[in-house]
Image (cartoon, grey):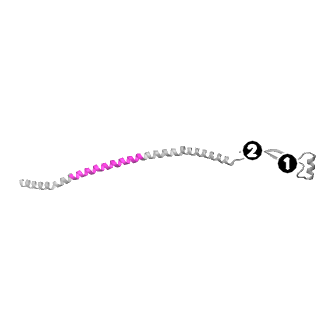
């Protein structure tokens, strides 16, 4: 806002007898005098106001953005990072447990296969042993 002072020329009735006489007769051209008066007025430059408002708005939004970044985004990112770090650890533990379980299952399966193989080998010999034991029994019975 600017204060401007301008000089304005105005008219008034002359003081004295001549002005009074002219006033009585109501003349519009005689009995008048010009005088200068300083007039002050306030002028608002809309462009300057707009620029100032835009400048302040940018500054406030910059501060707001910085505040959001510091007070909201950084703590949220830290919490997200902490969560996913813990989550990653749990997933890794689960993965290791599954790997160990798979290895244990393979070992158990191999042990079962070995046992099954040994039992089949023994099962193949059983008929021979039964035949031999029957023969021995018969021989012993004949001896006794």
Q: Nearer the viewer, residue 10 or 64?
A: 10
Q: Secondary structure at mark 2?
A: strand
- Lateral position of residue 18 relative to residue 44, left or right: right
Q: Is residue 97 magenta?
A: yes
Name the residue tied to disc 2.
4
- Residue 14 locus on image (x, y percent): 89, 46
Q: Secondary structure at mark 1?
A: strand
- Lateral position of residue 91 relative to residue 56, left or right: left
Q: Which residues are magenta?
A: 88-117
Q: Residues within 10 Å of mark 1 (few under 14, many from 20)?
A: few
Q: Nearer the viewer, residue 67 or 20?
A: 20
Q: Residue at x 40, y 48 (%)?
A: 91
Q: Residue at x 21, y 52 (%)?
A: 117
The residue furthest front is 29
- Lateral position of residue 112 relative to residue 13, left or right: left
In space, the residues marked 2 and 1 are separated at their CA atoms by: 22 Å
Q: Earlier in the sequence, mark 2 or mark 1?
A: 2
Q: Residues within 10 Å of mark 2 (few under 14, many from 20)?
A: few
- Lateral position of residue 112 relative to residue 64, left or right: left
Q: Nearer the viewer, residue 92 or 105?
A: 92
Q: Is residue 98 magenta?
A: yes
Q: Residue at x 85, y 48 (%)?
A: 11
- Residue 36 locus on image (x, y percent): 82, 44
Q: Would you say the magenta stretch is mainly helix, strand or loop?
A: helix
Which of the numbered marks, if any, corresponds to residue 62?
none
């Amino acid at each position: 806002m600017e204060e401007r002072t301008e000089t304005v020329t105005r008219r008034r009735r002359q003081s004295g007898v001549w002005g009074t006489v002219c006033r009585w007769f109501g003349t519009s051209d005689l009995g008048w005098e010009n005088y200068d008066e300083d007039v002050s007025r306030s002028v608002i430059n809309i462009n300057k106001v707009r620029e100032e408002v835009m400048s302040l708005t940018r500054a406030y939004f910059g501060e707001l953005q910085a505040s959001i970044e510091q007070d909201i985004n950084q703590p949220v990112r830290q919490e997200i990072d902490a969560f996913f770090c813990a989550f990653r650890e749990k997933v890794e533990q689960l993965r290791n447990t599954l790997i160990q379980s798979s290895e244990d299952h393979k070992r158990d399966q191999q042990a079962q296969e070995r046992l099954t193989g040994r039992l089949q080998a023994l099962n193949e010999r059983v008929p021979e042993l039964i035949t031999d034991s029957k023969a021995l029994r018969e021989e012993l019975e004949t001896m006794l």
